[in-house]
Image: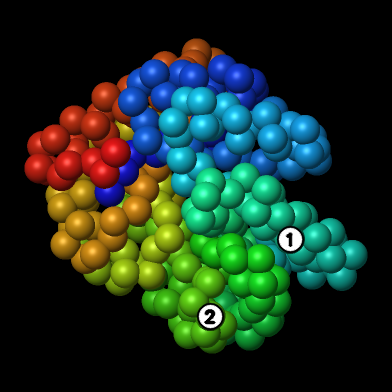
Amino acid sequence: MKLGYSTWGMPTVPIDTSIPHLAELGFDGIELTVIPRFTTELSTLDSAERKRIAGLLEAHNLTLCAIAGHTSLMAMDSEEHAENMSRLKETVELAVDLAQGNHLAPVNTTSGGKPEAWESQKQLLAERTGKLVSYAQSRGVTIAIEPHIGVIIDTPEKVLELLDLVGSPNLKVNFDISHFDIVGIPTEESVAALAPHSAHTHVKDQRGLAPDFEFLIPGEGDFDYVTYLKAMQAHGYDGFITAEVSFMVQGRDDYDPLAAATLSYETLSRAFVKAGIDRQR
């Protein structure tokens, strides 16, 4: 396994700053966030900027471990849905443009929708997801769907059913264990269910149980990363463990995105050592 960092925690930080900072800390990879309000928002990444980012990644020996393109698949307005699908397909094209040799980063997205709509809308979700995945497969890209508290796929069982309904090797999971930890699902249970199907991961820290919970920077809480890493390895996962800092944390008056990355690296690199897992650097 390797250690990555998501620029989700760096919405206002220029890519010229984030890439060197993460490389200097010792991260092995970076997840590039391209949603609105970010300095790397998708529409700003013309051909020249894509080439420049590829050059920065190469110069700093960082793998593009994923692209965070989180855009709802469950918009009920037809025009809005068409715009969302177009955006996700363009994010797939970004993964192609930023390919590093034979490695193409997975495109991560959440589903949107509401948990209570699962039974009535799961076929619609599967149909829409299938169309996106078919397009991604034609370009050699994997879609990694993220189960998330408060959306239509919010449990391991739902995401596994979605994988079965779509039935494509190019649909995997972006496994963020925090969304299961805050509802009391034990680490071993969620890891055993989802690690074998995961193309990418997120880790945060967290405190409390939903609805009375808060997301934290890795190292601020008491999540047992050592047990988590050992479980991920035991269940066959060999990809990136990627730190993500939530919007909840970013709302703090004193939030420092570079300091958050530093604390995340110190916490997770130490957990790798304690778990006895050599990063595949």
> From this viewpoint, is residue 95 visible?
yes
Percent across and percent down for residue 8 are 55, 36
Q: Can you tell which mark lies on residue 168? A: 2
Visible in this render: residue 244? no
Q: How many marks?
A: 2
Quarter of the figure with residue 48: top right
Pick whichever, 214 or 59, lies toward us: 59
| Image location of residue 277, percent across then percent down | 15, 44
The x and y percentages for residue 108 are 56, 55
Dot 1: few (<14), some (14–19), or many (≥20) neighbours within 10 Å? some
Kindly identify the residue that appears in the image at 21 percent across and 51 percent down.
Answer: 228
Quadrant of the drawing holding the C terminus = top left
As drawn, 152 above or below 64: below
Q: Which residue is mark 1?
A: 89
Which is nearer the eye, 274 or 54?
Answer: 54
Is 121 left or right of 214, judged from the image as shown? Answer: right
Q: Is residue 41 above or below residue 78?
A: above
Q: Residues within 10 Å of mark 2 (few under 14, many from 20)?
A: some
Residue type at the position of mark 1: Lys
- Residue at the (21%, 49%) spot, across then down: 229
**Gap between marks 2 and 1, in whole Å?**
17 Å
